Amino acid sequence: MKAKEVLLVCRKCKAKCCKIGGSDFTESEMRTVLKAGHKNFFDKVEKNHYELKSKMGRCSYLTKELSCGIHKVRPLMCRCWPVYPEYKKNKKQYVVIQCPLTPYLSKKNLEIMKKQASKLPRNLSGDIKTNLPKKDLDLIIKRFNKFFKTKRLR
């Protein structure tokens, strides 16, 4: 799918995924966003792991028009959405989040996203550490569970 088509679908769903806290970033991804001239909303969690400071559980780069304010420099975690790696007993699996974008994705799109998701560092996709306040984390989990379902990819 082209970026323009993706953003239209996201606007129609009111960017629900961007209202579940925002993405996590590697140091390199964080530096790319800052180098592109965007404001610094980052909080260092651990070595090579940055998260966005929460704005009531929303991605800090979500615009008023409900689109991604950093789309051209968004992190790998956002580029592979709605495919996400999950670890069960130290074995990596891939899940597809059932968001409004999912029905528009071809098998080829899903395979590309799976390949991208395979590059996510474990500390960004496994048992995620966070510095978010408990109330924001609770809100994000509640929103995620309300809006999204998952299915496993092989």
Image (spheres, rainbow, N blue to C red):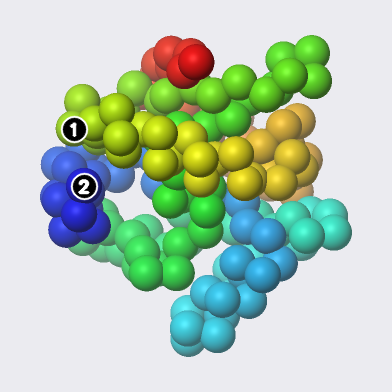
Residue 118 lies, with reference to residue 92, above or below; the image says below
Residue 70 occupies quadrant: bottom left
At x 30%, y 35%, the residue is 108
| Apparent side of residue 77 relative to residue 91 in the rendered image (left or right) | left
At x 52%, y 32%, the residue is 84
* Residues at marks 1 and 2, CA–CA distance in whole angstroms: 8 Å
Q: Amino acid at mark 1?
A: Tyr
- Coordinates of residue 27 in the picture (x, y in percent): 71, 67
| Apparent side of residue 47 relative to residue 121 in the rendered image (left or right) | right
Marks 1 and 2 in Cβ contact (< 8 Å): yes
Q: Nearer the viewer, residue 107 or 74?
A: 107
- Which class describes the residues within 10 Å of circle 2: few (<14), some (14-19), or many (20+)? few
| Apparent side of residue 86 relative to residue 117 in the rendered image (left or right) | right
At x 61%, y 51%, the residue is 24
**Which disc number belongs to residue 1?**
2
| Apparent side of residue 69 relative to residue 23 in the rendered image (left or right) | left
Residue 128 lies, with reference to residue 79, above or below; the image says above
Residue, far right: 47
At x 50%, y 15%, the residue is 154
**Which disc number belongs to residue 43?**
none
- Coordinates of residue 127 in the picture (x, y in percent): 75, 30
Q: Nearer the viewer, residue 102 or 10?
A: 102
State the SS at label 2: loop
- Coordinates of residue 62 in the picture (x, y in percent): 37, 59
Q: Is residue 11 visible?
A: no
Q: Which residue is mark 1?
A: 104
Indicate which disc, 1 or 2, sits on the residue closer to the N terminus: 2
Count of numbered badges drawn on the protein: 2
Q: Is residue 98 visible?
A: yes
- Coordinates of residue 114 in the picture (x, y in percent): 48, 35
State the SS at label 1: helix
